[in-house]
Amino acid sequence: MGRNSLIFSSELASPPKNERAEVELLLEVARRAEASGPDAKAEALLEWLYRLQQEETDPDLKLLIFTEFVPTQEMLYDFLTQRGIKAVCLNGSMSLDERQHAQVAFAFDSRVLISTDAGGEGLNLQFCHVVINYDLPWNPMRLEQRIGRLDRIGQTHVVRALNFVLEDTVEHRVQEVLVEKLKLILAEFGVDKTSDVLDSVQAERLFDELYIAAIRHPDHLDDKIEAIVREIQEQAHTARDNAVVTGLSEAFEPELAQRVMNHPLPHWLERMTLSYLTAQGGQAERRGTTWHLRWPDGELIEQAVFTAREAVATPTARHLTLSEDRLRELVTRLPPFITGQPIPCLSLPGLPDGLRGFWSLWRVTLHALDWSQQRLMPMFLREEDQRLFLPTARFIWDQLLQTEIEIHSYRGSEGIFEPIREVAETQGQTIYEELVRAHHDRLRREQEKGAYAFVARRQALERIGLPAVRAYRLARLVEEETTWREQLEQRSQVGPELVALMVIHVEGATLGTGEIISRV
């Protein structure tokens, strides 16, 4: 986008001998940077702001600007406000209320929202359609996520995205070569698999290594990029192969059927049912290979089995699954995760050694008078910086479904659950708004049909010859339509519900001894 106006001396090529010399060198560089005049990228940003304003013929055009660092964010805020451009900041250190206030300010008052990646999590900003990546993230997939804040359902404009990068820098070179290489992976594996690999904790480590190597050994940049791309391809291959387990492959293989038969869900249903009957005054008696079950209200189920294998072995038995009303009712009564509940700590293979964080599963529900819809939302927050990794959350979910895991300890949830819940509220807002839109679209179609029906009925009644009868029928029709519209208004009122179904602490490590849950 422009060239750096400050050229560093060769002193930086070799590290200082002591900390004092390092501090003095950094202070000298800072003084020269301050004296060199306006920041080249900031000036270019201002030029593009006016240029986009003219191209869009909109003097109040709104811009979403992403930065990597809070100090850069603060610098841009001062730079723009000093020139009469209203701006508002958003970053990960702000509370949920502060983030919502910033979003409202951007929607109605400010022209520019300056956000970090952490601050922009879960926001819907369809009223804006221009995004500027002032600082480029090392992982190219995060650029797609930034654009996704604007390019989603409800966007009425073509989204424009501008990336600022200094020419003739290592960053510029890496971006040029890496983007071309990743296009080949995207063409081979598709958007879903590629994004799941790139936007993960594993990929973050690869890009960190790439940029460090590019700075230390710029002459070997191409070789390092080739090595990184090969590793990404291997991860994409693995993700595609694992899709069979989660039901995403086109071909249903015999091995998958065997895994489904061996899934512990029937075992869980059996334990839940027997525990309920014992606690509530029912009876559960084992007779050979089947169960004799008597429910607290007296209903008797003879020759009951819970697994598909037992059902095949005993054709006369009654196979109990979640399709049974009684079992489904028991599942709905199970209490979700609550504050203060101990959090199991798991060692999970397939994750980088040393990775630690909290995986959680949430249910986002929309409640209306006559309609209820829900979605499940997995999340993974890295413990060291509370950063959200959604593809890693889905990867962990897959691993929990197909891998033997170890619970090696438990920890309290005090001081842990609430921060996770705050992130879930922000992330779940997107899902909830999609449910709201679906509900309102449904009501709108119903309203259009109903309004058309009332117009047709009114036209028919107005052709009645007897005035008294016509007036009576029309009055009744008005009452009926008024009642219908009132009911429609009541049905448009909705309420959200966010429930934590599970919270666990996960770390990447080799399995040891402990409590084993087979094929969770």
Image (cartoon, rainbow, N blue to C red):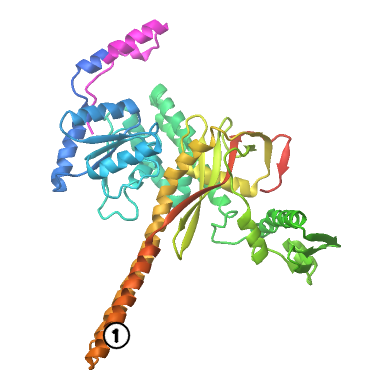
The image quadrant of residue 331 is bottom right
Residue 389 visible in the snapshot: no
Q: Residue furthest bottom?
A: 465
Residue 23 magenta = yes
Q: Report x, y in % for residue 500.
A: 54, 46
Q: Report x, y in % for residue 367.
A: 46, 58
At mark 1, the secondary structure is: helix
Residue drawn where x is 54% and y is 57% of the image = 248
Residue where numbered disc 1 is placed: 473
Amino acid, disc 1 = Arg
**Badge 1: residue crowd in 10 Å (few <14, some 14–19, many ≥20):** some
Q: Which residues are magenta?
A: 1-30
Q: Report x, y in % for residue 320.
A: 71, 64
Residue 512 visible in the snapshot: yes
The image quadrant of residue 456 is bottom left
Residue drawn where x is 59% and y is 48% of the image = 336
The image quadrant of residue 344 is top right
Residue 202 magenta = no
Q: Residue furthest right?
A: 288
- Which quarter of the image is occupied by the N terminus? top left
Q: Nearer the viewer, residue 65 or 486?
A: 486
Residue 322 horizontal side relative to residue 231, left or right: right
Q: Is residue 319 above or below residue 202?
A: below
Q: Nearer the viewer, residue 30 or 178?
A: 30
Q: Residue furthest front?
A: 468
Residue drawn where x is 83% and y is 60% of the image = 285
Residue 421 horizontal side relative to residue 475, left or right: right
Residue 142 horizontal side relative to residue 306, left or right: left
